[in-house]
Amino acid sequence: ARIRPEKAEEEKLFDYYDDQQLCLESKDAQQLTYNFDKVFGPDSQQDDLLDTVVKGPGGILNALKSGYDATVFAYGQTGSGKTFSMEGGPQWATDRSQAGLVPRLFETIFSDLADDPEISELRVFVSYTEL
């Protein structure tokens, strides 16, 4: 899960969060807790996602090297930051720090995998859907 920074006009989004848990209070004052494999706070950077989701243990890169298909799936309400996380900020083509997971994943695949001496053949098929 990734928490986007709060906007000035918004109320506090979460009562508490840590590396694997988000806690919030519902409209009827119930404490709700959600558990995740990893929670990225509002100060997280695009590189943090890449290091965990793509390059980390159990990441997409390891799956691809082992011959498996891989999927990155972003889900959330409108305005929650899916496009920013996946594609990047408005200047991502000229400001690498804003590049999202998709351009970073392509860069990683074609640099790390193509240079791996254990890989004799490399085929990449990509589909991208935004609903």
Image: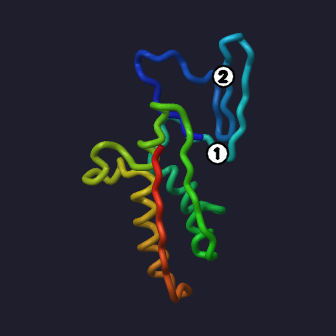
Quadrant of the rendered image containing residue 31: top right
Q: Estimate how packed mark 1 is, as few (under 14), some (14 to 19) or many (20 or more) residues with alpha carbons within 10 Å.
A: some
Residue at the spot of label 1: 38
Q: Estimate how packed mark 2 is, as few (under 14), some (14 to 19) or many (20 or more) residues with alpha carbons within 10 Å.
A: some
Whole-percent x, y for residue 92 in the image: 31, 50
Whole-percent x, y for residue 40 in the image: 56, 41
Numbered label attached to residue 79: none
Q: Where 46 sits versus 5, above or below?
A: below
Whole-percent x, y for residue 104 in the image: 42, 59
Q: Residue at x 59, y 63 (%)?
A: 70
Q: Is residue 1 left or right of residue 106?
A: right
Q: Quadrant of the N terminus?
A: top right
Sequence order check, earlier mark of 2 and 1: 2
Question: Which residue occupies the extreme top position in the image?
Answer: 28
Name the amino acid, label 2.
Leu
Q: How many marks?
A: 2
Closest to the observer, 57 or 78:
78
Residue at the spot of label 2: 24
Closest to the observer, 19 or 74:
74
Closest to the observer, 31 or 102:
102
Name the amino acid, label 1.
Lys
Q: Residue at x 47, y 65 (%)?
A: 126
